[in-house]
């Protein structure tokens, strides 16, 4: 079994760009993929959306789309990036992943994909707990949705501990940002490895 830790943030556009290869990786027999949200854009890492940041984000998104083929819709641009004064914060989606991990761990990677596409394709505000909970319900992850909306102390504590662990790994391996992979607990693969061919990624993992 090859253990791989995936450093990410659900609001990171580059992580969304890496989604296709991560979904493939997570389905391979012999691979144990652990999601490790770093909290990069959660809480204090979040910000209020202004015109300058919205313009920067869209330019970055177009680079990601060109490189990876992942779609960023015009509806997302107008309805989310165009909603100046709103919060850019991954707290709700990060908590949702931890809630799924506690109730249906085998579906966490799938939940990440749904949450990312909800924002970047369907222009749903995944900074809103109620919106995120509804997305979980549509996946039949009702227990996770209930936990998310309950402001559960154990969930909050588990999520906080998870972020601390991921931040510690990020620092220990010198990861400059997300996405990044830690292979077999010993080698860092930077995000660049996730935007080429899947076979190239597998070769890099095998060489770790």
Image (cartoon, grey):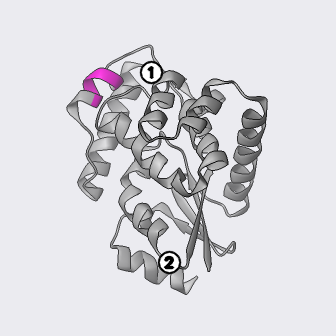
Residue drawn at x 38%, y 24% as measured from the top left: 52
- The residue indicated by pointer 2 is 29
Residue at image x 32%, y 50%? 64
- Please, what secondary structure does the residue beneath circle 1 have? loop
Cα distance in 3D space between marks 1 and 2: 41 Å
Q: Which mark is residue 9?
A: none
Q: Main secondary structure of the magenta part?
A: helix
Question: Please, what secondary structure does the residue beneath circle 2 have?
Answer: loop
Percent of width and height locating residue 90: 54, 33
Residue 41 seen by the camera: no
Locate residue 129 relative to residue 50 in the image: left or right: right
Foreground pick, 98 / 67: 98
Determine crowd level at label 2: few under 14, some 14-19, many 20+ residues with C-alpha closer than 10 A: few
Picture mark count: 2
The residue range painted magenta reads 76-80
Answer whether residue 70 is magenta in the image. Answer: no
Which residue is denoted by mark 1 in the rendering? 49
Rendered-image quadrant of the C terminus: bottom right
């Amino acid at each position: 079994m090859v253990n791989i830790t995936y450093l990410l943030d659900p609001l990171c556009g580059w992580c969304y760009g890496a989604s296709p290869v991560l979904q493939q990786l997570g389905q391979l027999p012999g691979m144990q993929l652990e999601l490790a949200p770093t909290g990069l854009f959660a809480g204090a890492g979040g910000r209020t959306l202004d015109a300058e940041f919205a313009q920067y984000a869209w330019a970055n998104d177009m680079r990601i789309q060109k490189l990876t083929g992942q779609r960023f819709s015009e509806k997302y641009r107008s309805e989310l990036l165009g909603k100046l004064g709103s919060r850019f914060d991954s707290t709700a989606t990060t908590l949702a992943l931890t809630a799924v991990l506690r109730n249906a761990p085998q579906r966490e990677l799938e939940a990440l994909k749904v949450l990312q596409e909800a924002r970047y394709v369907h222009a749903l505000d995944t900074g809103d707990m109620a919106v995120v909970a509804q997305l979980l319900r549509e996946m039949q992850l009702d227990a996770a949705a209930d936990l998310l909306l309950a402001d559960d102390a154990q969930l909050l504590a588990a999520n906080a501990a998870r972020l601390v662990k991921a931040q510690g790994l990020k620092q220990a391996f010198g990861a400059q940002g997300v996405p990044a992979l830690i292979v077999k607990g010993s080698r860092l693969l930077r995000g660049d490895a996730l935007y080429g061919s899947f076979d190239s990624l597998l070769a890099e993992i095998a060489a770790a």
